[in-house]
Every structure is written in structure tokens, then in C-alpha cells.
Amino acid sequence: MAEDMFEQFREHSVAEFFKKNRQMLGFSGKVRSLTMIVHEFTTNALDACEEAGILPEILVEVEELDRNKDHYRMTIKDNGPGIPKSHLGKALGQMLAGTKFHRYLQQRGQQGIGAAACTMFSYVTTGQSTKAVTCHKGKRIVADIAIDFKKNKPVITVLEENSAEETGLTVTAEFKDVRYERSNYGVYEYLKRTALANPHCSITLVEPDNEQTTFPRSVEKNPNRPYEIQPHPLGLTPHDLLEFAKHSRENKRLSSFLQNTFARVSAAKVNELRELTPKLNFNKRPDKLTWDEAERLVKAFSQVKWIAPAMDSLVPIGKERVEASFTNIFNPEVLMVTERKPKVYRGGIPFMVEVGIAYGGGVSAAQKRGEVMRFANKVPLLFDAGGCAITETIKTMDWKRYNIRNFEEEPIAVLINLVSVHVPYTSAGKQAISHEEDVMLEIKNSVMEASRGIQRYISSKKKAHEIATKKKVIGRYVHQLSSDLASLADADAERIEKKLNKLIEERYVRRKEEGDSTENN
Amino acid sequence: MVSEIRKGEGPKFESTLRTRSNTIYDEAVGCLRTGDKKETRKFLSVAQARTFMQTVAIAAKTRRFLQEELHTSIRGLFYQLKFTLGEDIDEDLFTEQGESNALIEDLEVALNVKREDLHLTTDRKGFVAGSMKIKDKFGGEETTIDLSRQGRSGWSVPSDVDNNMEIDSLDADFVLVVEKDALWQRLNEDKFWREENCLLVTPKGQSTRGTRRLLRKLADKKLPVYCLMDCDAWGWYIYWTIKTGSMNLAYLGRDFAVPEAKFIGVTMSDIKEFPFLEKLTIRAKDVDVKRAEEMMGYPWINRHKDWVRELKLVLKTRKKLEQDALQGERLTFVGEYIKKKIENKEWLR
């Protein structure tokens, strides 16, 4: 009896824990929660497709079951490799059981808390299980995934099992306590920006009112895969260090653990660390490392001069790709995209900033004014804009210098993608970049570089417009002047008019080519 | 301009700069005139294209008047040039008379002719009575006008007193200019001009070009010109325009100035001699005070010590006096006042 109660209590507590702490996992606010759900499934789909070498095709369908009760059904379908039956439960039903944990490479999934959290969110809010259809290596499985709160284990019920030629994963789940909105924080904007940063994918969204939007593919090739590298000591926190140490089975000593696990750590560097932390025993077992010791080590890391980590671990979207997707999605009047070399921050963490600025044309037509689109490793950052280094940089720019009178009111859209194996987020929410000095400076320089291109365009356009206006202003007086001159000088008006028109034509066209702005008064 | 266009150059013309900085006081003559600074007006300039076209349009129009030997007023000219530039152009050649008036002045400067020579007339305003006969050739007829036989209305000064008009006979010892028509009518009724053997003129406020030109011609006949104005900003301005010319029309120079003119009244000093005027003073307005201060700064005024003294008195008392006050005691007092002033040479230069 007592045991039953305890069991009940435990079951209850897992659900309660999730409910109470889901903000920590990104499920805060109704609109944001729905965006997070879409985020989890689309990033998983993109990563899976890219890893399998498939051009991603993603369908997101949002059905409103009862708006008053904030009740929705979500279907997310991809054409990825699918999931084998054996991994189905782990992938969709067990928290912190994904394939990405402890992999050190520039990857989208770094951000997420996994699809399992969505399954749990669905279960906690609706009591319904999540339905998955996976087509993997010729097999098609339709399964129902529930969660056993007692054991934090997935409960899989296979409903159908047959053969299939295609591949892919379709997940359908119901959610309450969420809300669909076409705001800057909503699913539509999230997918649009995802498409912008991932021109190799095709994304279709079906909204609750059945309106279907497709962000088509503009590049027919998957981006290069980032390759896995060892973490660099400068990117580590005490918590990271402890996590790595705990899982280090093959190393018996702290010294060999450090050398084998992290990049650029040689025997000589370990000796330097020894000198910096004389009280620390470098022969102890790594899994016996304490928090205090880890803290001291991390402090020592920052005092050692390291060789920078390998730069080629960074995979930006790429200039051509940004250009293609901007043209595809906004079709702006003018577009400037930067292509800059990687930089390092905090003395050794490589990162790269990509900036694309689109002006006029489709941006005006879409009623976009001063839009800032933030990305980290190609993933759109929709929330916490206020505290983000990117927003801060844009806000403090002297836009007037770039012929942009009022940034907030001009038809301008700015894409900023920060690429790094270790993105410096402000918080666990992973929606804002912290105010790292080196990162901010590079963001600023990149934005300035792209802005100069926009400035050149706007000022040459202005000049051309001015010249055309001048020509028009003067041109309208030619006829009258010619006839009066002719009458005064008893000359032929038509000939004078012809000659004058030619004169104006020559003068103002020539000026345009030379870019000469001096009006000869 | 036509040859410039043929050579592939933008048409242009040179003109004397008509800014205040290029307005100078000619001490030798005693009038305002323009300096030597020139400016070039160009058609191929956004800022000047429209006025350039308009100036040429006025030139073309007036040339036709000259050829046809017809006159028109500047208002008439404006209406003849107030048309839309073309079917597909939403703009008129001229939209306001102010535009054409200013450009007529430009044209006078550029061509160094008077508008009267271009057969352009202005509204008539001044009136004259006195022993003078004028021959007027007009509309193909010649008439002799006797200015002593114009009854209560007087002879109306035309805008052009040079072309086709000449003084046939003149019997007067001086010219008396009174600012206001009311006073002119008083003196006309009193037969002041006959008794004192003078020409009685009123510009009715600010002088027209015709009136100023007539006064110049009379001064050339060695007649002294005495002016009776209000003692206020407006009265002073009218006097100084007659005497030195205005800054706006400085380019007309001596032809439109009468440096010999003398200001016989009214002045604040008159109060001392005629105490009844004290009660008839008016509080000076800001514009009067400002004008007095300005005048003290003009070199052609502050070189006359008696003027400086008079202006200082105005600034000190902050009062002004109108010429009508002279009729305050007795309607015919004004005649006595003028006679006394001229006999005793009590005037300001």
C-alpha cells in the first residue's frame, strides 16, 4: 500500500517536474511552445537528412482542434532516413537520449532538448500518445509512443508493420496550452527563416485555416557536413569538464584524459597546467574530479597560451547560398552578403559571422521594415531579442552613415548567422548571443561591410534619380524657350529645340556615367 | 544665346547682381546704384531653368509690343504669359504676377533699359496741379494738357513720362510734394499752387516710377523739390525713395532719384514752435522705431547731422506726427506752415 502510494507519487512527480520546469526546456508561453515543438522536429529532420545525404523536404501541418482550449494537432513529416524500430522509443520517448549529446560539432541540435520532450509535453497536456510513421531501409512502421513516467521509459505499441520504398518520418501529436499565431515569434516566421538559412531544403506549412505556404528549395545540394572535432579547452565550463570526465572510461589518469579528450592539449601543456594548479593531483581518476577542481582547471585553461582550434570545423551557410535563398524568399531590389574569415573569441574559440542585407523590392512588398533575423548555426533565434549581442549591434549602428535614415522604417531585412562549435548563448534558453567583445566587434564589422554595399547602391540610385529629375525639370522648359528664342532672334524654333534637347541629353547622361555630382551653377 | 546653342553650349546671359551687398551709395551723385558685381544666368541649371525660360518669354513678348508700337501694363503682360506650357506638362509659364514683376526688373538690368522703353506700363497713382503744359502723343494723336485746368482732380501721372511726352511750357518756382492725397486736395482747393507759383504733386503714398521720373525731370529744370511727409517710418521711406532711389530698383540709379529733394516736414522739432502739435502726436510703433534705428545706420542718411538729430528725437520721445496734424488748428494753417518753412529754409536734406 505504502509502496503503491510511493509509486503514484513518483509518477506524479515526473509529470509535475516537467510541468513546473518546462520553461527551462523552452516551453514558456503558448506561442513560443508551439514554435519550440516545430523547432525540435525540423532541426532533427534537417540534421538527419543532411547526415544521410538527402535533400530535405519538410511538411508542417497545424490543425486547430479547439481554439478556446488552446488545443492543436501537429504533424511534421520529413523525407529523411527514418528511424529503425529499435531506436524509435529512444528517439521520441526518452529524455536526454538523443544521438547528439556529447558530440562536439557544429550542429543545430545543440540547441534543443529533443523530440522526447515534445512527446512528454503532448502527453502531459493532453494525455494522448504520439503517433509516428517511420520508413527506414524498406520497412514502414506505424507506432504509438507513450511514456511510462515511473521509469522515464517509452512505451511503444506497434500498430502496423509493412514494407515501403520511400524513407522518412512522420510524427503526429496533440498539444494543449499552445497557440498558433502569425507573429514574429510564430511557426510561420520560424519556418521562413529556417528556409532562408537552409536554401537546400523545401519547407511546406499548412496553417490552421488550411492556407498552404511552400518555401521552395533554391540550391540543389546539401551543405558540407561539419566534422567532429575535439573540444578546445577554452570553450569549456566546469560543468562540461565534469560531464566529459564522468564518461571517460578509457583514461585512468586525469593527465591522459585531458590529452586524449581535448584539442591542442599536449604533455607540455599538461605540465604548464600542473604548475598553475600545484595542489591538483593529475594522476587521479578523471571520474573522481570534483566541481572545485574542475573550476580550478578551467581557470588555469584561460591562463595557458593555446594553439587555436581547427578553423575548418566551421560551416557557414555560404555567400552564394544566402544570395540564392534571399532572392528566392524576398526577391529584394539589392542584396549584399558578406564572406569573411573565421575569427576567435575568448582567446581561442573559432567563430564566423555571416551577414546578408536585403533592401527594397520584395522586402518593401512584404511590408518588412528594419527586420533583424538572428541565427546561430543556421537556426533562427526568435526570442529574447532584447538581450542579444546581435540586436544590440544593429541598434547602435549609425545607419545614417549608410544612407539609411531610419532603420526601423526602411524596407530592409538583415540576416546575421553566427557560426561556432561553441555559440556563446546568454542562457540555457539559447535564444540570445552574449555580449562577447570579440564576437560583437566581428558582428559590427560584418554588418558594416554589408551596409557599405547597400549604401553604394542607394546613393547611386539617388544620384541617378536626381539626374533624371534634373533632366525632366529642365526638359519641360525646352519647347517654350526654343520658340521664344526663335522669335527673338528670328531663327528656326524646331532646330533650336532639337539642339537643346540633344545638349541636355548629353550633359545629364554623361554626368551619370562619370558619377559627377557637381552642379555647374 | 542662339549661337551658343548652335555651338553646343548651354544658353546663358550676364546680368548685374541685384543683391543688397551689390547696392552702393553713390556719394558724388547722391543716389543708390548697383555695384559692378555680375552674375550669369544659365538655362542648364535646375535652380535657374524656369526663371531663365520666363525671362526669355518676357523678352520675346515685349519685343513684339515694340514692333507693334503698343503698350501694356505689367499686369497685362502677366496675363498674356499665364498659360500652360504644354498638353502633357502640368505647369504654367507664369502662375503669379509676382514672378513676372521680378523678372521684368531682371530684364531691365540685363538689357540696361527701362521697362518703359519696353512698352510696359504700371498703374498710375500720382497727381499734379500747377502751371505746366504737357504734350502727349498717344494712340496716334497729340494732345496738349494744361495742368492748371484740371479742376479738383489734377493731372494723373502716367507710368512713362519719357516716351512720346514732353513738357511744353513750365511756369513754377518750386515743386511741392505732399505724401497724402487728402492734403493735396486741401492745398488744391486753397489754390496754394497758384498763390505760391509752384507745382503741387502727391505720389499718394509711395511714388510710382512715373512720378519719380517726373520729379527728376523737374529737378533737371532747376526747380527745388520740397517734400512734406509724415514724421514716421512710412513718410521717411517715401522721402528717401524720391531722394536716393530704393534698394530694390537701385539699378535705375540717377534717372529715378532726386538728390536735391528737401524734407520740410513734419518733424518732431515742429512741436517746439507750434505747441498745439504736442496734443496731436501719436505713440510711435515698433516699426517706426526700428526704421529710425535702421536709417541711422545707412551711410547716405547718417551723413546728414540734422537727420540724425531728428531721428534721435523720435527714438527718445517714442512719438510720431502725421502731416494731417497741421490742419488741426485751422484747415488753412498748412499753407502758412509750408511758406514759413521754405522762406526760413527750415528743412532736412
Image (tube, coloured by chain):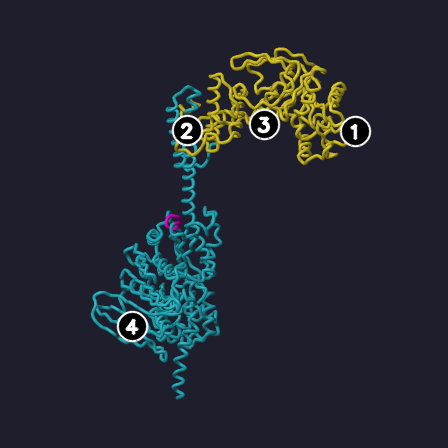
Chain colours: A cyan, B yellow
Nearer to us: label 3 or label 4: 3
Query: First in sequence: mark 3 or mark 1?
Result: 3
- Badge 3 amino acid: Asn
Q: Nearer the viewer, residue B292 or A455?
A: B292
Same-chain status of marks 4 and 1: no
Q: Return the mark for residue A88.
A: 4
- Residue A297 on the magenta span: no
> Disc 3 on helix, strand or loop?
loop
- Badge 1 amino acid: Pro
Left or right: B274 in relation to A331: right
Q: Which residue is mark 3?
A: B248
Q: Nearer the viewer, residue A438 or B136?
A: B136
Tell me which segment is drawn in magenta. A359-364
Q: Chain of mark 2?
A: A
> Disc 2 on helix, strand or loop?
helix
The image shows residue A234, relative to residue B227, as above or below, that is below
Q: Position of residue A369 (x, y in %)?
A: 43, 52
Residue A208 makes an appearance in the image: yes
Pointers 2 and 1 in contact (C-beta within 8 Å): no
Quadrant in the rendering for residue A73: bottom left
- Badge 4 amino acid: Leu
| Alpha carbon separation for disc pair 3 and 1 | 39 Å
Pointers 3 and 4 in contact (C-beta within 8 Å): no
Quadrant in the rendering for residue B35: top right
Q: Chain of mark 1?
A: B
